[in-house]
Structure formats: C-alpha cells, structure tokens
Image (cartoon, helix red, strand yellow):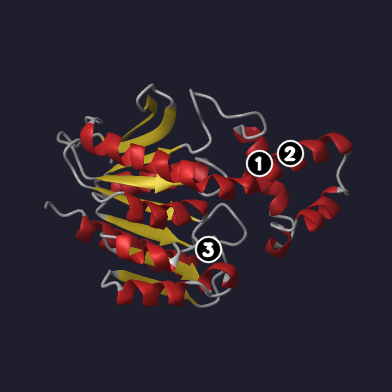
Amino acid sequence: MSLQTEWIHYGSEGQYTGYAARLSALKEPAPAVVVLQEIWGVDEHIQDVTRRIAQAGYTAFAPDLYARDGARPPGLDFARVEAAKSFLNTVSPALWRDPDARRAALERLPASERDELSETLELLFAGSGRMDEYVRLAADTCSFLREQYEYSAGQGVCAVGFCLGGAIAGLLAAEDAALRGAVVFYGNPPGAERAGRIRCPLLGLYGELDRRITDAVAPFAAAMEAAGRSFEYHVYPHAPHAFFNDTRPVYHAPSARDAWVQTLAFLNRVLQPA
C-alpha cells in the first residue's frame, strides 16, 4: 500500500511541526491518531510507528514536541539526540536519571564529545518539567486534526504515546474532552486525582521489569475504577521499559507483538463513527 508522508507546520501561527502519514488510496478524511514521542523526539522509530498506524487506515500524526517555528533548540537536533541515545544504550538504564552516575560514565569520553552529550542529556531529562507545555501542544494538535487538517477534519482522534509520550497521552485524556481514547506505552500514569476528569477509555501497556513506572499502575487502576472510568492494562512478563522500540537493545518481541495487536484492536473500537 502506498503511503503519503509529509512534515508540516501548523498551529495558530504555524509554530508547531509534525510528521504526517496516510494511505494514498484514502479519498475521504479518516480518523486520526496522534503519535506522541519518547524523549528522543520524532526519530526514525516514531516515524515508523506513525507509518504503521497509517497503513492500518488512519491519518497518523506525530507532533515534534521540541520544535518551535520550524527548528529545534541547540542541543536537541536529530544528530545530537541520536548520539545521546547511542551513549545511553551502552550504560545501565538505572544510571539514566542519576546525574552523578551519568557524569561518571561520560568521563570516559573525549572532552568535546563529553560536553555535547552532557548538554543534550540535560535537555532531554529536563523535559519532565515541561509537561504542561507538552500537553497543551498535544491538545492543540488534536484540535488541528479534528477541525483543520483536510485528511482528518470532522473525524475522531485518539492518542498513542510512548514513555514521555505515554505520560502525555494519559494527561491529555484528562484535558481533552473530545479525545476518543488513549494508549499509554510504559508512561507514568496520571495522578489518581485526575481519574474523574478522564472521559475516554485508556489502554496501558507496561513491562514487568520497568518497576519505576509499572508499580504505579495498580493504584491508578483502582482510582479509575472508583471514578467509573475505563482503564484496561497489560503488564508483560520479563519485558523492560521501552520494550516496543525495535531500534534499541531493550526490544522484547513477544511483548511488542501482543501490544501492537492490543493497540490496533483498541483503535478500531474507539474510533468507530459516533
């Protein structure tokens, strides 16, 4: 099946950038899926996921959370982020969020490379402090897809997010009353106090070994049940964080296969015509 892909600028002043994919054969607007990135941005993996979702018959759209007015800030360009990803693939995930441990690992590198990596890693891990901004961007993206983008205007919108993007997808569900559903891949669940504000169904997909995130899932599920909200979740045995990312060493194929089936079934269910 032939796909059409494009990078576009959108927003009230064209300040946002996003990667869009759709089937060439579709002649009418299709339901839209917002693909929310990991901390690496809209890299090749997220672009590939966006294309896969488009191949299932949706208008798929990945907003670049880091880009403004057509550019990323210094230190977060694609090459620098890829270098940071490659470095982190060589160390234990337990070190990622420990600044002292990261610095110790970086000390083994040449000074110029160390300085650039250190700057980029600081910027990447500081993203958790910008969640409100990212949720607003995601909500603006949903509105754009529902109201303006010719390939999805008038159709339902769902969100699928990974890691950072998974956390954003859950928060978005509490902010966007028109969202049809959200799929959270190994992202921190929203605080229990937000459960009553979530109107759409949620699907959560987590790895057993990812205790930092997965241990918070059952309390959130209890809050959702108490609020009368829909939250189905799966914790995959032996699966680490980011088990779906087939470009990284943590990829766990059995879990990824089932998670993809669960995702497509969920999208098909929540994006049926109203």
- Disc 1 from disc 3: Cα separation: 23 Å
Locate the N terminus by quadrant: top left
- Disc 1 from disc 2: Cα separation: 6 Å
Q: How many marks?
A: 3
* Residue 112 x, y percent position in the rendering: 84, 34
Which disc number belongs to residue 5? none
Quadrant housing residue 105: bottom right
Q: Is residue 261 in sight in this rendering? A: no
* Residue 67 x, y percent position in the rendering: 51, 31
* Residue 39 x, y percent position in the rendering: 56, 47
- Disc 2 from disc 3: Cα separation: 26 Å
Q: Is residue 168 in sight in this rendering? A: yes
Q: Nearer the viewer, residue 267 or 199?
A: 199
Residue under numbered circle 3: 243
Residues marked 1 and 3 touching at CB (< 8 Å):
no
Point 33% across, 48% down: residue: 53
Query: Under tag 1, what secondary structure?
Result: helix
Within 10 Å of the Cα at label 1, are there few (<14), some (14-19), or many (20+) other Cα atoms?
Answer: some
Residues marked 1 and 2 touching at CB (< 8 Å):
yes
Residue under numbered circle 1: 123
Q: Could you tell me the amino acid type at mark 1?
A: Leu
First in sequence: mark 2 or mark 3? 2
Q: Could you tell me the amino acid type at mark 3?
A: Phe
Of the two numbered discs 1 and 3 in the rendering, the one whose residue sits closer to the viewer? 1
Answer with left or right where residue 223 lies relative to residue 133: left
Q: Nearer the viewer, residue 241 or 131?
A: 131
Residue under numbered circle 2: 119
Of the two numbered discs 2 and 3 in the rendering, the one whose residue sits closer to the viewer? 2
Point 51% across, 56% down: residue: 163
